[in-house]
Amino acid sequence: MKISTKGRYALKVMTDLALHNNGEYIALKDIANRQNIAVKYTEQIVSILGKAGFVESMRGVSGGHRLAKAPSEYVIGDILRTMEGQLAPVGCTADIKGIDCPMSESCSTVSFWRGLDKVINEYVDSFTLQDLI
Amino acid sequence: MKISTKGRYALKVMTDLALHNNGEYIALKDIANRQNIAVKYTEQIVSILGKAGFVESMRGVSGGHRLAKAPSEYVIGDILRTMEGQLAPVGCTADIKGIDCPMSESCSTVSFWRGLDKVINEYVDSFTLQDLI
DNA sequence: CATAAATCATACTAAAATGGTAGAAATTTC
DNA sequence: GAAATTTCTACCATTTTAGTATGATTTATG
């Protein structure tokens, strides 16, 4: 029952960008150093954030990364789901139901898991990046 | 962000025992067959449940397992934490703070994670085994 | 007491996920 | 054209997960 470093670090990166959100591009190595994450690993994380449209990037000298939107427009749940895939704590509550579990009809625990799924997603969707800084 | 099969299967085993809670010992292979879990894997799970005091076991012919208490006295959170260890979604909110994270003082995400930890544990602690059957 | 049915204990293992590293190519500014 | 930066792709070591395998121990019963 863990959030991986990808999700945790992504939040750190995003808050770092939000705290330095002045329109300038911020060099990845500065983010990595401030947040104490390996530069090369930070690259992978930012790459995912970029493909999801969360950050804008610029190459070359004085290039770097910056937020694509205002901090208040980022829902934390969206960031985490992008990094972690589904946040569903067990497989059988995920989108494609029944694929792993031929007993889902008779399974008395499935509604319990669905409820857990719900409280987790409602929580992470109740914060924006602005709330974290 | 997943609950492992140990936790999921443990809940299945416990609900199975609760549904057949007539004071008799129930053979492990019957539980395993009904719940569609490998017998040998079920043994490991029941072993943990037994050491935690959740089930009572009896060896030998007509031996098996049964609940140690009434279904309403089992808090689901206790069962899951026994199987999964801490349910804390990130390391730095677990009991021994700061051990992994030298930045916990300045980390703006930590209170967010603590909150997630809280909603998860409150949810799983709001159900008993009786509620699942 | 022998046997069968069951738990209990311990070790092993294949596959997947995690948490990175490494090297080089492409882009941009000066 | 040189330097600084992102981008892309591949690789890799360790840990976790999800079981299997083997065999010993205990108990009821005939």
Image (cartoon, coloured by chain):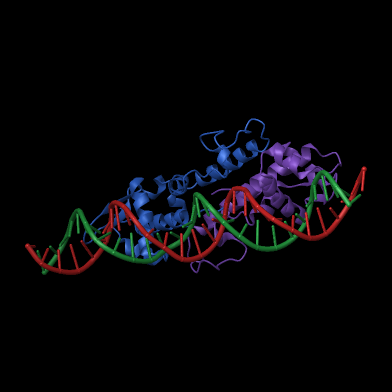
Chain colours: A purple, B blue, C red, D green
Q: Quadrant of the C terminus of chain B?
A: bottom left
Q: Is residue A78 visible?
A: no
Q: Residue furthest top?
A: B105
Closer to us: A17 or A111: A17
Asked if residue A101 is positioned above or below residue B114 in the image, the reply reads below
Quadrant hosting residue B103: top right
Where residue A112 appears, as percent x and y from the top left, is 52, 54
Q: Is residue B70 visible?
A: yes
Where residue A31 appears, as percent x and y from the top left, is 74, 41
Where residue A79 appears, as percent x and y from the top left, is 70, 50
> At 66% from the left edge and 42% from the top edge, which residue is drawn?
A37
Closer to us: A12 or B15: A12
Q: Judge from the rendering whether residue D30 lies leftward or rightward of residue B44; answer left or right.
A: left
Asked if residue A54 is positioned above or below residue A31 in the image, the reply reads below
Closer to us: D21 or B11: D21
> At 43% from the left edge and 48% from the top edge, which residue is drawn?
B79
Q: Judge from the rendering whether residue A81 lies leftward or rightward of residue B83; answer left or right.
A: right
> At 69% from the left edge and 38% from the top edge, which residue is drawn?
A35
Count of numbered circles in the view: 0
Where residue C4 appears, as percent x and y from the top left, is 20, 69
